């Protein structure tokens, strides 16, 4: 299967492309979203004009993002991550993909973003 639609680069924040994102909030919670302009979205969350959750739990820190070629793919990952437990989100944030529960080797190979 072609994995060229996924790119992982934890250092890239300026390039505009669809991304799924996870932020750590000041209260220890996580906020997951998606955007096509990461730099702007970070500024929105920090200034209090982003999502309702991050507005109430500032400051926030970007802890994970994955780049996609298509907005729908980034949004689907956002929705998938929303249903995960905190522990599972932390495995993703830490790049410990092999330890993610419920994902077969086949799923990891075809669906999870490659590690940095």
Image: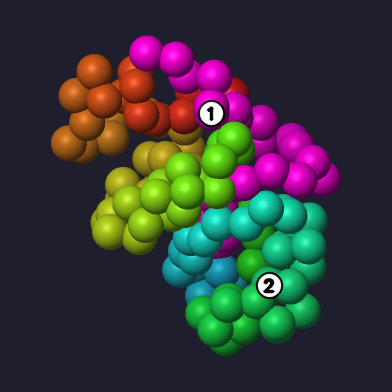
Q: Residue 27 colored magenta?
A: no
Residue 30, image x, y percentages:
47, 64
Nearer to the camera, 71 or 112 = 71
Residue 15, image x, y percentages:
79, 41
Q: Residue at x 34, y 18 (%)?
A: 109
| Secondary structure that dominates the magenta span | loop
Label 1 environment density (alpha carbons within 10 Å; few <14, some 14–19, many ≥20):
some
Disc 2: which residue: 45
Residue 86 visible in the snapshot: no
Find the residue positioned furthest to the top. Answer: 1
Residue 4, image x, y percentages:
54, 19
| Image: 28 above or below 86 | below
Q: Which element type, helix, strand or loop, lies under badge 2?
A: helix
Nearer to the camera, 70 or 47 = 70
- Say which quadrant the C terminus sits in: top right
- Range shown magenta: 1-24
Disc on res. 6: 1
Nearer to the camera, 94 or 116 = 116
Q: Residue at x 17, y 36 (%)?
A: 102
**For residue 100, which quarter of the picture?**
top left
């Amino acid at each position: 299967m072609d994995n060229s639609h996924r790119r992982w680069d934890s250092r890239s924040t300026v390039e505009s492309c669809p991304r799924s994102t996870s932020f750590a909030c000041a209260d220890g919670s996580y906020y997951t979203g998606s955007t096509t302009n990461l730099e702007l979205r970070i500024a929105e969350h920090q200034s209090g004009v982003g999502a309702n959750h991050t507005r109430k739990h500032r400051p926030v820190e970007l802890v994970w993002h994955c780049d996609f070629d298509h907005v729908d793919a980034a949004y689907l990952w956002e929705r998938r991550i929303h249903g995960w437990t905190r522990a599972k989100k932390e495995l993703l944030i830490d790049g410990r993909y092999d330890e993610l529960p419920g994902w077969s080797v086949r799923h990891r190979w075809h669906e999870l973003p490659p590690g940095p």
